[in-house]
Image (spheres, rainbow, N blue to C red):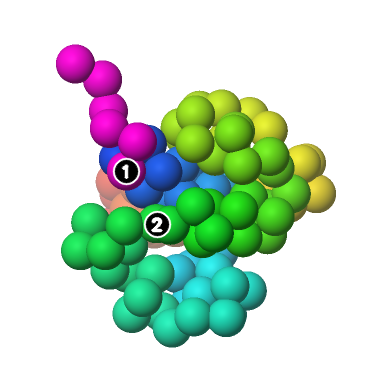
Amino acid sequence: MGMSLDERVRSAVAALLHATGESQTDLAAALGVSQAQVSRRQSGGAPWSLADCDAVAAHYGIEVLELLAGPTRATESLPGERRRVPRRHTGSGRTAAVRDGGAR
């Protein structure tokens, strides 16, 4: 059996948060609610209403039906300018021992 509508919306919101680099606090501010309210909705403690879904979709610049379709459709529909720019790996996190071939 597939995901319920509530699960699809929660997954889509999580995927959109990840794809944009936003936090629950950022989304809450955009929706005019508290971070705790977003957290309750994301944990399943409270449902995302249709009005909430409409506001979330508008915030991300997607159609509400794309949000309701789930995480893949929602993130594929996300406008390019809303996507976070991935950080480039510079290798600077490597230890001196690894850079020097383990010799010290």
Secondary structure, mark 1, is helix
Which residue appears at 41% of the width and 43% of the height?
9
Left or right, 11 with reference to 32: left
- Tags 2 and 1 in contact by the CB under 8 Å rule? yes
Q: Report the Cα–Cα distance between label 2 and label 1.
A: 7 Å
Few, some or many residues within 10 Å of mark 2 (<14, 14–19, 20+):
many
- When the figure is inspected, residue 41 is found, relative to residue 29, above or below; the finding is above
Q: Which amino acid is tagged 2?
A: Trp
Going from N to C along the chain, the mark reached first, 2 or 1, is 1
Few, some or many residues within 10 Å of mark 1 (<14, 14–19, 20+):
some
Residue 8 drawn at (x, y percent): 37, 36
Q: Residue furthest top?
A: 1
Secondary structure, mark 2, is loop
Q: Which residue is mark 2?
A: 48
- When the figure is inspected, residue 30 is found, relative to residue 50, above or below; the finding is below
Q: Which residues are magenta?
A: 1-6
Q: Which residue is mark 1?
A: 6
